[in-house]
Image (tube, rainbow, N blue to C red):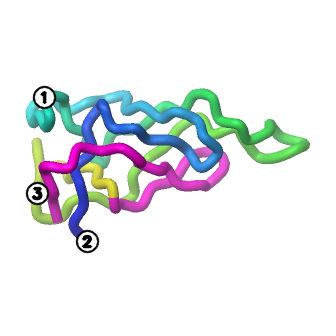
Amino acid sequence: MPGAILHVGATVTCAHGGQATPTVPNPRVMVSGQPTVLQTSPYAVAGCAMPPPNAGNGPCVTGQWLSGSVRVLSLGQPFALQTGQSVCAPTGTPLLPSVVQPRVLAT
């Protein structure tokens, strides 16, 4: 499914409102003047509101994209897409991209 390529300036949160940021940007390809993010790049999550164990199974600490671009690659790796599937650890909830660059789409 086509989707917008994620970049380091995209607003990505966990399902509980924690801010997610990519730990390994891809400076090889820039969109909107910022480095892109590959599917293999882990995200660090800060400020997750999920309660710790005994009251919940959180908070979210990391996130990872499970699917990305199929036809467009950089350094032999797929890009993370707004429409891709993702998961946060340890909660198992998805990452939610809400504000992304609208100009570059990939399949």
Where does label 3 land, which residue? 72
**Residue 43 lies in the magenta-colored region:** no
Q: Does residue 73 appear to the left or right of 78 in the view shown?
A: left
Q: Residue at x 10, y 36 (%)?
A: 29
Mark nearer the N terminus (2 vs 1): 2
Stretch of the chain drawn in magenta:
83-107
Q: For the residues marked 3 and 1, what is the alpha-carbon distance in whole angstroms?
A: 19 Å
Instruction: Give the residue number, with chain letter if any, for mark 2.
Output: 1
Amino acid, disc 1: Gly
Asked if the residue at tag 1 contacts the one at tag 3, i.e. Cβ–Cβ closer than 8 Å, the answer is no
Report, in whole angstroms, how far the alpha carbon at label 3 lies from the one at label 2: 12 Å
Q: Which residue is mark 1?
A: 33
Q: Quadrant of residue 86?
A: bottom left
Dot 3 falls on a residue whose secondary structure is strand
Q: Which of the pair 95/102 is nearer the observer?
A: 102
Find residue 85 and report its horizontal and vertical position in percent: 41, 61
